[in-house]
């Protein structure tokens, strides 16, 4: 999916959600509201073809920015990477990391259901199999969650957002690895990627969706 196609999908899905008066969070969390820290859906939204996945969750007040409702964590499955490719960092307890995923990026959503920021997290946050930045960047086009059992509008929106912001996500993943290098120098190899480092968010950037869409090289007939 190129950026123009991705932008069309983002516009279409956001417009549809507005017309139906059902923003992102109401399509993901229960009607009564989210339980803090729970995954929605509970077993993650998994694409039936490529095994990429997402889940949404909400942090408790005081542990999130005031204008954030919640955020998506987006993952590739290890089978989407070359066979035999060794992770940069393994989960300490591999038998407890049965999902066999590598974290791609997180997408923060504001209280109106509009994307507000991208960010990366330290390895321990999602118990991932951590692969180097350039491996993840090379496989960004493999991220597709159009065919999970969850809301179609949400699935297509998430897939398109990754395609639309591929360049920004690549820079965030590189910044993630640079921050990891700083943490290794400060805390050592074992602690740098774990809770002992005291660092959860490694890189982040705000989202201005209108500015992004307006920056694209649209066909002339769509600019009229």
Image: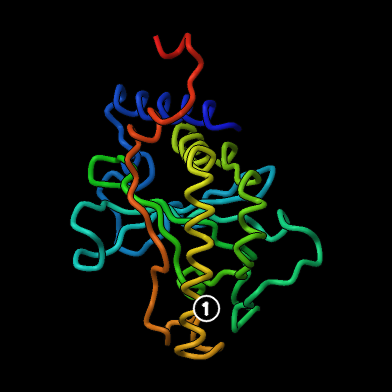
Identify the residue under disc 1: 181
Residue 122 x, y percent position in the rendering: 47, 72
- Seen in the picture, residue 120 relative to 33 is either above or below; the reply is below
State the residue in front, 63 or 185.
185
Secondary element under disc 1, as helix, strand or loop, is helix
Q: Quadrant of residue 15?
A: top left
Q: Tell me the quadrant of the picture where the N terminus can be found.
A: top right
Instruction: Choose between 27 and 214: the one closer to the eye.
Output: 214
Question: Which residue is drawn at the image coordinates 74% and 71% (left, top)?
Answer: 86
In the figure, is residue 59 to the left or right of 49? left
Rendered location of residue 63, percent (x, y): 25, 68
- Residue 37 figure quarter: bottom left
- Mark 1: give few (<14), some (14-19) or many (20+) Cα within 10 Å: some
Which x, y percent locates residue 132? 63, 67
Judged left or right of residue 107, residue 110 is left
Q: Position of residue 151 (x, y in %)?
A: 46, 36
């Amino acid at each position: 999916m190129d950026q123009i196609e991705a932008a069309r999908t983002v516009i279409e899905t956001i417009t549809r959600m507005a017309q139906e008066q059902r923003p992102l969070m109401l399509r993901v969390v229960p009607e009564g509201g989210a339980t803090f820290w729970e995954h929605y859906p509970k077993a993650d939204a998994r694409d039936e073809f490529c095994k990429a996945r997402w889940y949404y969750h909400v942090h408790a007040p005081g542990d999130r920015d005031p204008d954030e409702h919640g955020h998506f964590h987006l993952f590739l499955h290890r089978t989407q990477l070359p066979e035999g490719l060794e992770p940069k960092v393994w989960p300490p307890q591999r038998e407890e990391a049965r999902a066999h995923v590598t974290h791609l990026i997180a997408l923060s959503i504001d209280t109106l259901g509009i994307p507000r920021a991208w960010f990366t997290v330290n390895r321990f946050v999602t118990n991932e199999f951590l692969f180097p930045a350039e491996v993840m960047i090379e496989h960004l086009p493999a991220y597709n969650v159009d065919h999970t059992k969850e809301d179609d509008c949400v699935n297509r929106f998430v897939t398109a957002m990754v395609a639309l912001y591929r360049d920004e996500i690549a820079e965030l993943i590189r910044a993630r690895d640079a921050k990891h290098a700083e943490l290794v120098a400060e805390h050592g190899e074992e602690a740098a990627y774990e809770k002992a480092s005291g660092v959860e968010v490694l890189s982040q950037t705000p989202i201005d969706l209108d500015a992004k869409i307006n920056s694209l090289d649209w066909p002339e007939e769509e600019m009229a």
